Image (spheres, rainbow, N blue to C red):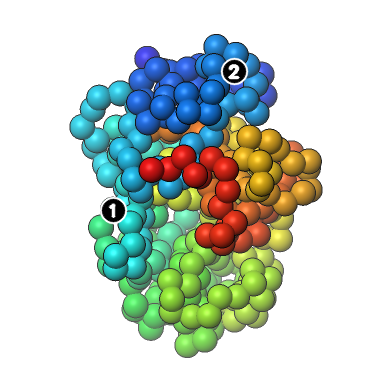
């Protein structure tokens, strides 16, 4: 139906728009959840000819419905984390190869070949449950690096510290990918002056520490590891692609992914560049679920699709389209 080669080789906005509209129609006619949502909004799919006319499915649908385009048995099921009694999101991934293509193409687009890296993953809360897309992502990157020191380090801060020290003068690119609270634990217990180390935080205190503003968090990590920048990854269970931040800049997306900012009080309208609103994500790699997702994140776009994540909606702030979730 769709050749993923076209998706991962999008060259310009015109090509992106054409693909997005083709995928919208494909998903409308083959995804009953998305079709019912679109129909409930009174949107005629034949009149959708612009990105801002495409309906964005509230992300909560992944908790209450099987958001699936076509009839298939998924090769992977990604699930979100949640406390006891809390409903969690479920993303049925038709083909693992699509996720891997998106991951590898996106990583190479921003950072170069994973084979040039040693990847150290510090993701304890994610490793301790099944179905984490972040763990799957790290596993694939670790395998691709082919380096014996690449791997998961769970709560083994002392072992990780020894590995970092051994790699400090190795001449290899070293990427430390970690959940926020674990990186802070490592910084406090085993600081190391390693100016060439790339630290990429994936967000999340998971109830282990008090929440911190991003600037304060990054300053603590910079001081502990002697680095100039802290990098970030923006991804989620419901997406197959990731956005990345190179330090103090906002997040940037690969060519097959775009961000729109919706009005918090009128989710079918959009705000101007620089204004705060809800983050809508177009991920063309989400071929067999839904490529058009209205997240619960607040943010704003600066220029050239660079966006900033400012936090999440409070439950009382969720308006409009979310009321259609049953």
- Above or below, comparing residue 5 to residue 92 in the picture: above
Q: Position of residue 140 (x, y in %)?
A: 35, 48
Kindly identify the residue that appears in the image at 32 percent across and 51 percent down: 79
Frontmost residue, 227 versus 259: 259
- In the rendered view of the protein, which quadrant contains the C terminus? top left
Cα separation, mark 1 vs mark 2, equals 35 Å
First in sequence, mark 1 or 2: give its number. 2
Q: In which quarter of the image is residue 233?
A: bottom right
Q: Name the residue under label 1.
A: 131
Q: In this view, does 139 lie to the left or right of 166?
A: left
- Above or below, comparing residue 206 to residue 42 in the picture: below
Camera-near label (1 vs 2) is 2
- Does the rendering let one see residue 6? no
Kindly identify the residue that appears in the image at 35 percent across and 26 percent down: 32
Q: In this view, does 65 lie to the left or right of 234?
A: left
Callout 2: helix, strand or loop? Answer: loop
- Count residues near mark 2 (Cα–Cα under 10 Å), then give few for <14, some for 14-19, many for 20+: some
Q: Position of residue 306 (x, y in %)?
A: 70, 45
The answer to whether the residue labelled 1 contacts the one labelled 2, judged by CB atoms less than 8 Å apart, is no
Kindly identify the residue that appears in the image at 68 percent across and 71 percent down: 215
Kindly identify the residue that appears in the image at 67 percent across and 24 percent down: 13
Q: Mark 2 points at which residue?
A: 48
């Amino acid at each position: 139906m769709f050749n993923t080669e076209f998706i991962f080789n999008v060259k310009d906005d015109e090509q992106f728009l054409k693909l997005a509209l083709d995928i919208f129609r494909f998903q409308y006619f083959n995804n009953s959840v998305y079709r019912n949502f679109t129909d409930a909004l009174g949107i005629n799919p034949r009149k959708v000819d612009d990105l801002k006319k495409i309906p964005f499915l509230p992300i909560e649908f992944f908790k209450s419905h099987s958001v699936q385009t076509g009839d298939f048995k998924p090769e992977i099921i990604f699930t979100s984390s949640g406390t006891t009694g809390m409903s969690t999101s479920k993303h049925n991934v038709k083909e693992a190869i699509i996720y891997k293509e998106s991951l590898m193409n996106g990583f190479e687009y921003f950072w170069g070949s994973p084979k040039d890296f040693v990847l150290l993953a510090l993701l304890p809360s994610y490793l301790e449950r099944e179905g984490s897309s972040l763990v799957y992502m790290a596993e694939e990157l670790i395998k691709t690096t082919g380096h014996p020191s690449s791997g998961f380090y769970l709560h083994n801060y002392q072992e990780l510290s020894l590995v970092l020290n051994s790699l400090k003068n190795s001449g290899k690119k070293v990427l430390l990918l970690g959940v926020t609270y674990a990186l802070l634990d490592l910084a406090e217990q085993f600081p190391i002056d390693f100016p060439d180390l790339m630290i990429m935080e994936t967000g999340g205190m998971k109830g282990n520490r008090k929440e911190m503003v991003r600037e304060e968090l990054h300053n603590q990590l910079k001081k502990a590891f002697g680095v100039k920048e802290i990098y970030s990854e923006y991804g989620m269970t419901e997406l197959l692609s990731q956005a990345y931040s190179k330090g103090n800049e906002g997040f940037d997306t690969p060519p097959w992914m775009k961000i729109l900012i919706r009005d918090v009080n009128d989710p079918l309208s959009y705000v101007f560049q620089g204004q705060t609103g809800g983050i809508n994500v177009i991920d063309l790699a989400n071929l067999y679920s839904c490529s058009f997702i209205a997240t619960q994140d607040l943010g704003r776009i600066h220029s050239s699709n660079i966006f900033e994540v400012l936090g999440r909606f409070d439950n009382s702030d969720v308006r409009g389209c979310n009321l259609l979730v049953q």
